[in-house]
Image (cartoon, rainbow, N blue to C red):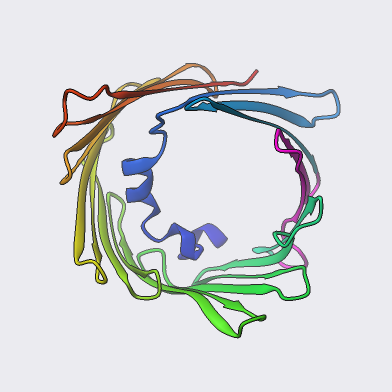
Amino acid sequence: MAAAGPGLYTEIGKKARDLLYKDYHTDQKFTLTTYASNGAAITAASTRKNEAIFSEIQSQLKHENVTVDVKATSESTVTTTFTIHDLGTPGLKAILCIPFPYQKSAKAELQYLHHHAGVAASVGLNANPVANFSGVFGTKTVAVGADASFDTSSGDLTKYNAGLSYTTNDFVAAVTLNNKGDSLAASYYHLVNSTTAVGGELTHIFSSNENTLTFGTQHALDPLTTVKARFNNYGMASALIQHEWRPKSLVTISTEVDTKAIEKSSKVGLSLVLKP
């Protein structure tokens, strides 16, 4: 039922963002997921970026409508997240995030999905919390939304964004106003056929009068292999190939090159995801 609605604010323009930016890496990442006898999923991940290595291990346990996630990182932080689905009514989700050592990032959140609305509200669990509210109203075809954050300690609106989207079976267009009205972005996603999609995004920053235009495409070579490419007006070109060599296990190789400075070495990223 909830899926027939406009979704949450984060979904405005998501199709184009995923096409243009998802899975492009310039670092090396390895992820391994296993399952315990009680059904708990245990995921270990390690990322090498430049000369630094970041690692984390995450355990997820589901019981009826409750999900518990515990994530520990190499930076000595542990975050526990409790999620309750369909809390009292279909479409209502409650999320409680508690880090250790206890930090300002602890928060409680409610999300509600309806045929004609998607609403999310969160508040930090500290003495001077930041409250965030977002709402999207409309249908699965046409939706308009807003996203705002309020800092109770300063009394300031620290974030306010707005967006509009239009969606059909093979085409998605979106316009968003971000960064307190300083950035305007227009994007589109078009599913050309069952194997090929194209998309683009134009961003204008009013304070610097700067424009960024990015075009991208993806094509399924076969049911298990996908290639993607993108290019922007600053001459940055990227490409990747992703292969599902077994169910839910992916290997992704991506590269990025500055076409205006070919003499510089290109950046290459590798991602390996293993699931049983």
* Left or right position of 157 against 23: right
- Split into 4 quadrants, where in the image is the C terminus? top right
Is 113 situated above or below 35?
below
Q: Was residue 82 drawn as part of the magenta stretch in this picture?
A: yes
Position in image of residue 98 (x %, y %): 78, 55
Residue 274 vs 1, above or below: the answer is above
- The mark tally for this picture is 0
Residue 75: x and y in percent read 70, 38
Q: Which stretch did the figure color magenta? A: 63-89
Give percent across and percent down for residue 119: 57, 71
Residue 1 visible, this angle: no
- Horizontally, residue 235 falls left or right of residue 267, namely left
Q: Residue at x 78, y 74 (%)?
A: 127
Residue 95 falls left or right of residue 222 = right
Q: Quadrant of residue 258 in the image?
A: top left
Q: Is residue 208 magenta?
A: no
Reply above or below: 97 against 148: above
Residue at 70 percent of width and 33 percent of height: 74
Residue 192 is situated, as x and y percent measured from the top left of the image, at 21, 41
**Quick one: which residue is furthest to the top in this view?**
245
Which quadrant is home to the N terminus?
A: bottom right
